[in-house]
Amino acid sequence: MDALEALMTRRSVRAYTDEPVADDQVLKILAAGMQAPSAGNQQPWHFVVLRQREHLDGLAAGVLKFGKMLGQAPLASLFVCADVGREQHAGYWVQDCAAATQNILLACHALGLGAVWIGVYPATSGCWRCASS
């Protein structure tokens, strides 16, 4: 699949099989996220991969307002979290993390996996941002 085909055919998928996502696929998806452009090449993101069924069920049960589909997802969540302590250009972390998220969605599609972007920020008042220590 070429880049334009991926862009034009990607869809938000909210129903999943129970087939696990292979570790090598997860690594490819993460690598795609890390290739996203960022202001000043600051790469202010951390990626969190969540596979534990009890955690996915907890998120689906109400922690994430629009995350009901996580109850059937074998790999939910690849959370893209901003590390504002790594910012070189204040405020651009939102765009940077959005670009990483889009790369992740396109990588999932290219690998034949279904994915959906579940918006969390700013509805959570920034609680998903990570602060550097």
Image (cartoon, rainbow, N blue to C red):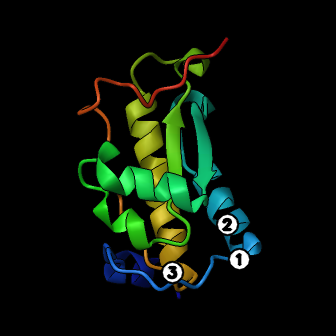
- Which residue position is annotated with label 2? 26
Quadrant of res 98: top left
Which of marks 3 and 2 precedes in the sequence?
2
Q: Please tell me which residue lies in front, 118 or 111.
A: 118
Would residue 77 be visible to someone looking at this image? Answer: no
Q: Is residue 65 left or right of residue 81?
A: left
Q: Residue at x 59, y 54 (%)?
A: 50
Can you say whether 88 is above or below 50 in the image?
above
Residue type, numbered disc 1: Ala
Would residue 1 be visible to someone looking at this image? Answer: yes
Q: Position of residue 54 (x, y in %)?
A: 53, 56
Q: Circle 3 sits in a helix, a strand or a loop, which is it?
A: loop
Q: Circle 2 sits in a helix, a strand or a loop, which is it?
A: helix
Q: Mark 3 packing: few (<14 Cα in 10 Å), some, or many (20+)?
A: some
- Which residue position is annotated with label 3? 113
Q: Is residue 68 left or right of residue 102?
A: left
How far apart are the alpha carbons under marks 2 and 3? 11 Å
How far apart are the alpha carbons under marks 3 and 1? 11 Å
Q: Please tell me which residue lies in front, 112 or 106.
A: 112
How far apart are the alpha carbons under marks 2 and 1? 6 Å
Q: Please tell me which residue lies in front, 60 or 44.
A: 60
Residue type, numbered disc 3: Leu
Q: Position of residue 2 (x, y in %)?
A: 52, 84
Q: Can you name the residue that lies furthest to the top here? A: 133
Quadrant of res 7: bottom left
- Which residue position is annotated with label 1? 22
| Tags 2 and 1 touching, CB below 8 Å | yes
Q: Residue at x 42, y 51 (%)?
A: 58
